Amino acid sequence: MVHHISRRTFTRHAAYVAAGAALAPALALAQADGAVGRLVVGYPPGGTLDQTARRLTESWRTQGRAYLVDNRPGAAGRIANAQLKREKPDGSVLLCTHTSAMTIYPHVYASLAYDPAKDFKPVAMLASAACVIAVSSAVPPEVKTLADYVRWLKRTETGRTYASPAAGSLAQFLGYRFSQAAGVPLTHVAYRGSAPAVQDLLGGQIPAYIGFVGDFLQYLESGKLRLLAVTSERRSRFLKNVPTFAEQGFDTVTGLESYGVYAPAATPEKTVATLAEAMLTASRDSTLIAGLSQVGLEAAYLGPAEHTRLIATERERWKPVVAASGFKADE
């Protein structure tokens, strides 16, 4: 069982440094008709999703496609997502978002203003990222594996807490799956972004954090955290010495966050196919691949049909998990 509290409730007086400086506006890419399209992102500039979108538009520029990144932050991306269904279905306005918006959000928000299965048409998946569980100095130094961690959790009265970058996130429910498998009740602490959570982890103010690979890359040599496991089926190429959950006997704790592009549902198949082909070309762009690597993402292309199947499968996979957790997000 996992209890859920907000980060503000957990630590009202903790100070942290917000991360994510605004990046320069995306370059426009010239299209055949001279128009400039918009690639909408439901988060502020500087974050992983924003950087993914900007890398894509930069790659599209070399193909002669003109799109600007249009940041529409708010409500964990739901405002931007809902806006897309009202746009013209001609490929001029697209959405770049994480798969959780299509697979987990329908189960955690009682009044979602869009239906992922009816209002959007998946164009393609571009990248993916594994989650990682890390522990801080608040956890004894002899804890080096998941088995060590579970033994400690069963002994401690004060350390049964893990944080994630957001309420209703994939990381939250991966933590719930771990809690179930370990047989230890854990309290989930939701932060508003990864930066403050990682700062509190480095400072030992929280015992554990489940975040994305890119959250940890610059701190690997800090000596202030220990990475215990990754949620991918195979070890991350960024963290080759960190075993998977499955390797350590927790094969139900697997999952990746994917990043892709979506069009309004009525967009013609020919338009979607053209956009998907442009994304396939971008996924092979060495500059884009290097840029994604800087934030812990791996280029992972799936075309429209495969992307659609993945979303449907993941939506059904997480439905019983969310229900069993009892979690409902604040609207």
Image (spheres, rainbow, N blue to C red):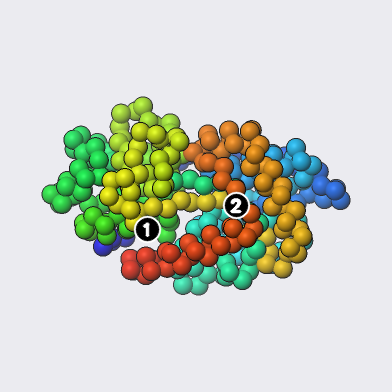
Which of the two residues, 7 or 234, is positioned nearer the viewer here?
A: 234
In the image, is 280 to the left or to the right of 63? left
Number of residues whose C-alpha sits closer than 10 Å to that of mark 2, classed few (under 14), some (14–19) or many (20 or more):
many
Q: Earlier in the sequence, mark 2 or mark 1?
A: 1
Give x and y (percent) for residue 307.
Answer: 59, 57
Give x and y (percent) for residue 190.
Answer: 37, 54
In the image, is 200 to the left or to the right of 109? left
Q: Quadrant of residue 166?
A: bottom left
Residue located at (63% from left, 69% from top): 119
Q: Which residue is mark 1?
A: 173
In the rendered structure, find residue 302 and report the number of the disc placed on it.
2
Residue extending farthest right = 33
Give x and y (percent) for residue 127.
Answer: 56, 46
Q: Amino acid at mark 2?
A: Leu
Between the residue at mark 2 and the residue at mark 1, the CA separation in whole angstroms equals 24 Å
Q: Is residue 105 visible?
A: no
Which of the two residues, 57 or 146, is positioned nearer the viewer here?
A: 146
Residue located at (43% from left, 31% from top): 218
For label 1, the SS is helix
